[in-house]
Image (cartoon, rainbow, N blue to C red):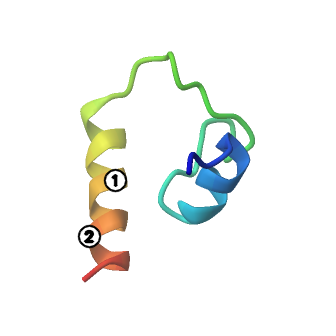
Amino acid sequence: MRKSPRRFLESCEQILLGKDEGKKLHPQGQTTRAECAAIIQRFTEKYK
């Protein structure tokens, strides 16, 4: 069963924080290396 985008984002709590103080996600935008590293770090910390 496929999750809705909102349910997916709720399951990613505190991993994907978004832009503009966490208020916006831009799925088609570009990500810097630092942003990607932060996402990976939060993911590994949450799912150790």
N-terminal of the pair, mark 2 or mark 1, is 1
* Mark 1, secondary structure of its residue: helix
For this orientation, the residue located farthest to the front is 1
Q: Nearer the viewer, residue 6 or 44?
A: 6
Foreground label between 2 and 1: 2
The image quarter in which residue 2 lies: top right
What residue is drawn where x is 57% and y is 64%? 11
Say above or below: 41 vs 23.
below
Tell me the tag on residue 44: 2
Q: Which residue is mark 1?
A: 38
Say above or below: 27 vs 9.
above
Q: CA distance from mark 2 to mark 1?
A: 10 Å
The image quarter in which residue 48 lies: bottom left
Instruction: Name the residue type under label 2.
Output: Thr
Tell me the tag on residue 3: none
In x, y percent, where is residue 33? Answer: 25, 34
Query: Local crowd at mark 2 within 10 Å, few (<14), some, or many (≥20)?
Result: few
* Mark 2, secondary structure of its residue: helix
